[in-house]
Image (tube, grey):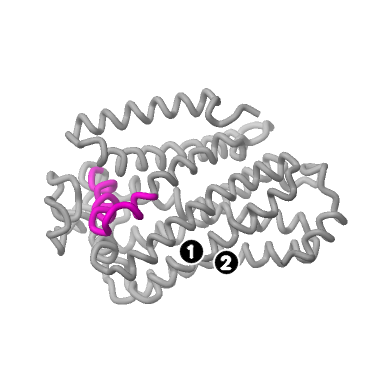
Amino acid sequence: MVPPMFDPRVASFAVLGLLLTWFAAYYWGLGFPIVAWLALPLMISFVYSLLTGKSVVEALASDTKSTLWSPWMFAWIAFWMAFDLRYWYLPGNLAGAAFVTIYDPSHHLFGGGAAKSDLIPCTNTNATSSGCSFLPEYPTHVSWNVALFNQGAFDPWVMLRLRAHVLLNSIGLFFNGAQLYLISSGKEKQNRLVGRVAIFSQVVGTSNAYYIAWTTHGAIDAYGNEKSVWAFGSMWLSILVPAGLGMRAIYKGDVASHRRWMIRMYGALFGSFFYWRFMALVLQPLLSGPNGWLFYTCVSWMLGIVTFEISAQKAGMFDAQFYPELSEPLVKADYIHIG
């Protein structure tokens, strides 16, 4: 297996990403720090979603094994995690402005009638020189962008939980990818340790997000009020239920069921993280405001589970012979005494 840093596909996408980044810097006249906060995360999300879609299409169109699980794919997640740290080293208002700025160009340049009618100015203009965005040429923003900015920038309690949510989910994304690689390489002990970290990170991270939604979204029209609480509840359960059923299966020694539920959990988190952002960028002309927010939140995790289920099936990850080094009695005896 070619290490991620030497894979020519990774190198080519890295070069393309740098070119796109510097083009964006030239076009918008941005300094390098802002480019690092905004353009690179946007590029990574876009490319990673395309790569995943490409893997699924290839898996459906041929009898070859899917490439979704190779190390170079989750190397992109590690790259993304580095930029997620901006939520920790930037003040809340700047971190919120960075988020809004990512969506401003697509909402203004490609927005249809629905999107245009939903664009509103910042309600708090003391965050940056241009309000709640780093791009002064866009004085208005989608309503849920403004609501999210106001929560993160001016509510320290929400910002703290948001930071914990982003960090833990990023860790879960990376460790889930690493776990798939480790177990397919027969590294059983490392897989168990990484799996525990992944489950803990995902459950606690998504619980933080749902707690924010449960305690605050009901009073915010831009999110859809109580509908947003239910939408985020479905996203939270998409992690919690597979995690619980997967752990229950492995304690019973049912390795096959455990594997299925863990892959579904990973798919749900992947969809909630990457597909949500991708849909928020490209579907804004069709679904604006609360309708878009609710649609992305409910559909992204479903799409993630379907994507991973299809790819794993095609890759043979549910076949009994996929892990020839692991025997049922050994795994059962070892896992039942965890803790």
Q: In the image, 334: left or right of 173?
A: right
Q: Residues within 10 Å of mark 1 (few under 14, many from 20)?
A: many
Residue located 36% across and 65% down the image: 160
Residue 93 included in the magenta stretch of the image: yes
CA separation, marks 1 and 2?
9 Å
Quadrant where the N terminus lies?
Answer: top right
- Where residue 225 appears, as percent x and y from the top left, is 32, 73
- Where residue 128 appears, as percent x and y from the top left, is 16, 53
| Residue at which label 1 appears | 206
Secondary structure category for the residue under label 1? helix
Residue 333 included in the magenta stretch of the image: no
Q: Nearer the viewer, residue 207 or 300?
A: 207
Residue located 69% across and 32% down the image: 63
Q: Three-letter amino acid code at disc 1?
A: Thr
- For the record, the magenta segment spans 85-105
Q: Three-letter amino acid code at disc 2?
A: Leu
Quadrant of res 259: bottom right
User: What is the total number of numbered labels drawn onto the structure image?
Assistant: 2
Q: Vertical placement of 329 versus 210: above or below?
A: above
Task: Report the magenta stretch's main SS.
Answer: helix
Q: Vertical placement of 176 versus 62: above or below?
A: below
Q: In the image, 173: left or right of 259?
A: left
Quadrant where the C terminus lies?
Answer: bottom right
